[in-house]
Amino acid sequence: MKKLIEKTVGILKKQDIENFDIYAVESSGFTVEVKNKEIERIKVPVKKGLAIRVVVNGKLGFAYTTDVSDEGIRIAIECAKENAKSSSPDDYSFSMPAENFLDFPLYDDRYSEISTEEKINLALDLESKVYSFDPRIKRVRKASYKDSISTIYYYNSNDHSFNYTTSSFSLSILLAAEENEESQMGWDYDVRRYFSDLNVDLVAVRAAENAVELLGAKPLKTKKIPVIFKNTVFAEIIEALSPVFLGNNVLRGKSLFADKLGYEIANHVFNLYDDPTHESGIGTMPFDDEGVATRKKAVVERGVLKNFLLDIYSAKKLGMKSTGNGVRTSISALPQPGITNLVVEKGALGIEELVKTPEEVLLVTDAMGIHTINPISGEFSIGVSGIYFKDGKKVQPVTGMTVAGNIKELLTNITEVGRDQRWIGNICSPSVLIKSLTVSGE
């Protein structure tokens, strides 16, 4: 791929182009899904592609190709130049040469040594172990193993270039527990950078517990009550909330916090960081996807909104500096503001202590509809399941409930942050106690 980029650079430098950059990806992976001790599906994706941005007469043109032959590259360059003609003039700039490094490897150097048999057996082992956890586990809908390894290449007309390789490995399972003609679903997922860090036993136990603990669940009467969002649920809330912190949404007026920079938007116990340097995060990277060196930065610190997450373009439009958050979702997409690893800073209390803090509390262990949180108004209404506690003791499992409110109120009503941090994708969060929310049921 390096030789391909060198050839592409040589062609671009001979064109009537003011500035350009090249972003290329080589990736491969393996996915296996099993059910009833049988392999249901195997996928072995291999991807290779290159994207080009050019600036001609102050206009930006973009094209990409998965055909990395000489002819494929030539056509992509011509398409990028042609596309520039139909865009509007603007003030575009590209990253300057910079150095950045991480003091730990971003990929598992054993990747090529891990056999297909080992990968399949891991998924089969996961399915097998959930049945041994509890006789009420009756069905596994799907157990899966997935891995990938990717190398990112970048070069621009300021002679800024770099490349790095990342890997990820994950396990997931969806199962059902049954008792007295009732069924409850349980799910768990884990993703790691290194194969040896995957823990089949832990994923199996958590998934089984999630299902078994909800057997016999029923709704509570509608009430206003303290609520604990379990770490996995609050991680999903943070992911759904993340667009409000992105520079492009701030520019478009599509963020409820667009005019709140420097103001308090949450309780002082709440801290949120975008950390592309985190050793455990799968979003860790030395440079963003347009070549800006990355760094850890506070998004919300002691309740105060400290930073928006910016790429070069949104930073310039807002009169700020890029935060190293120019992210491409694929080679077919232009870079725009995105998250790397969003981390909610942990507090002092374990989940056992959190449930003892208020006189009564609903521990939400699962939620549906989190993605419907409105990033402009902040309004939300989500279906929840969980456990109702009184005086620190479990009273009953709960399902068929709805929690509604506004994100602004939710953040300001955070009273405690737990210490049980957990990664869900590139979001890391502990459990969080909310002073009170309206919970609708019977």
Image (cartoon, grey):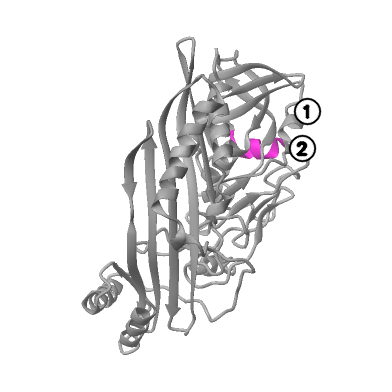
**Residue 109 rendering spot, x and y as whole percentages:** 51, 65
Inter-mark Cα distance, 1 to 2? 10 Å
* Residue shown at 43% from the left, 73% from the top: 153
Give whichever of discs 1 and 2 has the lower sequence position.
2
Q: Residues within 10 Å of mark 2 (few under 14, many from 20)?
A: some
- Of residues 244 and 331, which is closer to you in this image? 331
Amino acid tagged 1: Thr
Q: Residues within 10 Å of mark 1 (few under 14, many from 20)?
A: some
282 to 133, vertically: above or below: below
Quarter of the image with the C terminus in it: top right
Q: Residue furthest bottom?
A: 14
**Residue 114 rendering spot, x and y as whole percentages:** 45, 56
Element assignment for label 1 = loop
Residues at marks 1 and 2 touching, judged by CB atoms closer than 8 Å = yes
- Of residues 400 and 407, which is closer to you in this image? 400
213 to 48, vertically: above or below: above
Q: Nearer the viewer, mark 1 or mark 2?
A: 2
Question: Magenta-highlighted stretch: main secondary structure?
Answer: helix
* Residue shown at 54% from the left, 81% from the top: 97
Checking the image for residue 357, the label placed there is: 1
Give the extent of the magenta segment: 406-414
Left or right of 128 on screen, residue 273: right
Amino acid tagged 2: Leu
Q: Which residue is mark 2?
A: 349
Is residue 403 something that shows in the picture? no
Element assignment for label 2 = loop
**Residue 434 rendering spot, x and y as whole percentages:** 69, 32
Q: Residue furthest top?
A: 180
Q: Quadrant of residue 212?
A: top right
Q: Is residue 151 magenta?
A: no
